[in-house]
Image (cartoon, rainbow, N blue to C red):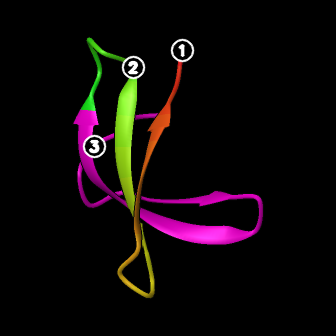
Amino acid sequence: MQIAPGRQVALNGVEWTVDDAHGQLGRLVLVDGDGRAETRSFR
């Protein structure tokens, strides 16, 4: 899967939009439909 700003993903039944992706750091900034932002890590 390609992770890039603007891409939509679903995690635990919640739809998120990728706001920013830091591949070298393994972090994503996700925004939900209400505008709430969360930073998530990945490997």
Q: Is residue 14 left or right of residue 6?
A: right
Q: Which mark is residue 26?
A: 2
The residue depicted at 35 percent of the width and 81 percent of the height is: 35
Does 15 sit above or below residue 38? Answer: below
Rounded to the nearest whole Å, what is the CA distance between mark 1 and mark 3?
A: 15 Å
Q: Nearer the viewer, residue 3 or 32?
A: 32
Q: Amino acid at mark 3?
A: Ala
In what element is the residue under mark 3? loop
Image location of residue 12, percent across then percent down: 77, 59
> Mark 2: which secondary structure?
loop
Classify 10 Å Cα crowding around label 2: few (below 14), some (14-19), many (20 and above). few
- Residue 22 in the image: x percent, y percent? 25, 27
Residue sitting farthest toward the bottom: 34
Where 24 falls versus 5 (above or below)? above
Residues under labels 1 and 2: Cα distance?
A: 6 Å
Residue 12 is one of the magenta-drawn residues: yes
Q: Is residue 43 magenta?
A: no
- Quadrant of the image occupied by residue 4: top left
Residue type beneath disc 2: Gly
Could you tell me residue 43's position as x and y percent? 54, 14
Q: Is residue 28 above or below residue 11?
A: above
- Point out which mark residue 43 bears: 1
Please report the bounds of the magenta region as a residue range: 1-21
In the rendered image, which residue does mark 3 sit on?
4
Q: Secondary structure at mark 1?
A: loop
Q: Quadrant of residue 11?
A: bottom right
Q: Measuring 26% from the left and 61% from the top, which residue is drawn there?
A: 6
